[in-house]
Image: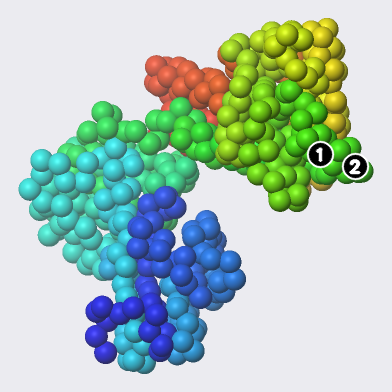
Amino acid sequence: MSPANHSTQTRSGFVAFVGAGPGDENLLTLRGADLLGRADVVVLDRQAYGPLLRHCREGAEVVDISADAAENSVSLKTIQAAKAGRTVVRLCSGDPSFFSSVTDEVAACAKADVDFEIVPGVPPATAVLTYAGIPPAASVPEFRIVDAAQVDDWAKHAACEGTLVIYNGVADAVPISKALIAGGKPDSTPVAVTSDGTTTEQYTVVSTLGRLGPDLKHAGMTEPALIVVGDAVGMRDRLSWFETKSLFGWRVLVPRTKEQSKGLSEQLRSYGAVPEEVPTISVEPPRTPQQMDRAIKGLVTGRYEWVAFTSANAVKAVREKFEEYGLDARAFAGLKVAAVGEATSRALVEFGVKPDLMPTGEQSSEGLLAEWPPYDSMLDPINRVLLPRADIATETLVAGLTQLGWECDDVTAYRTVRAAPPPAPIREAIKGGGFDAVLFTSSSTVRNLVGIAGKPHNVTVIAVIGPQTAKTAEEFGLRVDVMADKPSASALAAALADYGAKMRHAAVSAGEVPRRPSQMRRGARRRVK
């Protein structure tokens, strides 16, 4: 049966062999993501490609072959599922057409008369080089890719006049370099070895064929890795962009709720960091809902002139109450709405409400009060303000509004309770220096993190959102290294990135290999250039 032009809707089932790419989950092709979204069954090595499951629909069956990778066993599973009329995606390393082990699985599908498709992936041969700052085929007459496991005579490859890329050769990198020299390649030929390419664990050793042995001796290189031989390696100093990111490879603890940490984690990833979200508080409904019920009724019937939101959680709590009553953002018509900061404002805009008032300076209750107009009976027909807030909110805003002539209904919209302790490996990493940095976005995150997991190790960089949080951190015996120039999570992440960039620059200027804070603790493995 021909594999061309098959639909995933065929009655007899379907198998798609999808290239997962070189390691970076964002390099999955659009076709691959689309097929994952429609798959009934996904067959993969979960340890290697687990993050790609985010593209799958709810209810898709996942077959993990990490513990059972026998080709005939995998083939049988995919064929049986397809024969049952199901759409199967078999995730493959890199590109299924590049030195892949799934050729026999494809042949088995063809023999069993099962429809199949092969979806190319971004091959490591080009992607890893690009991420290492080595142009794969710039101004060279030849770009040659070989599998070391299938090479008996390196002399013919020593004649390569351009860039030579070697798969599956890291264990024999030194013998390969000697064989290339014996075949006529100058011992001064540049060579680079990159392991874990396109991931935040990527590490590159640059050397020459003649010096590769000593330079690799303490590097701890393992597969997956690529060896690149040729003058293109010399362009890495100018074109390296991935490993030189300000927080490249930093493991950063983000002690917030999942909802709050999403945007912050994305920003940290853009700096090359690996964020780890550890909730320190749990947001729960009020113990008694009657107070919020009365507030929503008053909001609809015109009891309030203003509604002030001091957190995105407050917006979420009101929105959920609206949905419970069948209301939407139109219920805010005629009301004035205040937001304490950018995150709260974004939550309101997503709800369909544009704030009328936001602090132009400090994003806090004090900053909001500095902008708030005093009550004027000639301008304001109603003098009452609704404040849906947390059960532990401070009295600063209520006191300030009362001084301005407003009456406040301070309503508990949600409760904040200390989250359960994180798993033991996380706690051990926090106390043992496994994290490179921790971001504290409030005094409560300091208190709660220390309470549920213990104090961060002294090599861990402590970054805080403002002076009050810094004071709390210092009370717990923590050294504050970074403070945001304005009280926002985005500014805090940017400040940490600037700190990391300065650390990297100082190391490079001193002729040293940049190291992450966690690599500076006693007993940490140290890579030598």
Q: Residue furthest left?
A: 141
Q: Residue 319 is drawn in which quadrant?
A: top right
Please state if 418 lies on the left or on the right of 42 as rendered: right
Q: Amino acid at mark 1?
A: Lys
**Callout 1 touching callout 2 (CB < 8 Å):** no
| Callout 1 secondary element | helix
Q: Quadrant of the N terminus?
A: bottom left
* Viewer-proximal residue among 352 and 472: 352
Give the foreground label among 1 and 2.
Answer: 1
Q: Residue 336 is drawn in which quadrant?
A: top right
Residue 473 seen by the camera: no
| Disc assigned to residue 290 | 2
Dot 2: few (<14), some (14–19), or many (≥20) neighbours within 10 Å? Answer: few
* Viewer-proximal residue among 71 and 8: 8
Determine whether 211 is above or below 179 in the image. above
| Disc assigned to residue 297 | 1
Q: Amino acid at mark 2?
A: Gln
Residue at 73%, 23% (x, y): give it: 306
Q: Residue furthest bottom?
A: 112
Q: Give percent across and percent down for residue 105.
A: 37, 81
User: How much space separates mark 1 and mark 2, taking CA atoms?
Assistant: 11 Å
Please state if 366 lies on the left or on the right of 528 as rendered: right
| Disc assigned to residue 42 | none
| Callout 2 secondary element | helix
Determine whether 215 is above or below 366 in the image. below
* Viewer-proximal residue among 294 and 20: 294
Q: Give percent across and percent down for residue 154.
A: 19, 59
Q: Residue 186 is drawn in which quadrant?
A: top left
Residue 89 seen by the camera: yes
